Amino acid sequence: MRLTTKQKLDQVVVTGRPAMGKQPLPAGATAEQLAVLLKRAVYEIDCRKAGQASRSADYVVFIDQADVLSRFPDDEQLRDLITAVSARGPALGVRMTRP
């Protein structure tokens, strides 16, 4: 069975503008799932900085930073990605918020 574009988009969880109805990752999300989410946010930051993406609306990442850091204390990649998004994102309309 082939998935339609809408079905494929429905399977992409979490990132995007709140008005788009995205749902947060489940509480037991893996470090890999969280890294993908944060890498997408960093990509959005880079696109907005380069002028390739609209800044008309906030790009929101639904993530609890404290929870992620407490669950994966030794994961340097996650720590670096969270730091990058929280440091560079707000000026460009990319922010993290608790689900």
Image: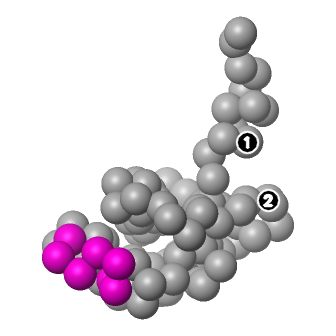
Residue situated furthest top in the rendering: 1
Which of the two residues, 63 or 52, is positioned nearer the viewer here? 63
Q: State the image quarter where residue 21 is shown.
A: bottom right
Residue 10, numbered circle: 1
According to the image, what is the colour scheme of the structure?
Answer: one colour
70 w.r.t. 81: above or below = below
Q: Nearer the viewer, mark 1 or mark 2?
A: 1
Q: Which residue is mark 2?
A: 20
Which of the two residues, 42 or 76, is positioned nearer the viewer here? 76
The magenta segment: 69-75
Q: Residue at x 59, y 73 (%)?
A: 62
Mark 1 and 2 residues: CB-CB less than 8 Å, in contact? no
Left or right, 84 with reference to 25: left
Provide residue 69's location: percent of width, then percent of height.
Answer: 33, 83
Disc 1 to disc 2, how far (Cα)? 11 Å
Q: Residue at x 48, y 61 (%)?
A: 29
Left or right, 66 with reference to 62: left
94 w.r.t. 65: above or below = above
Q: Is residue 59 in view? A: no
Say whether residue 73 is magenta: yes
Name the amino acid, label 1: Asp
Q: How many marks?
A: 2
Give the position of the C terminus as an image quadrant.
Answer: bottom right
Which of the two residues, 11 or 30, is positioned nearer the viewer here? 30
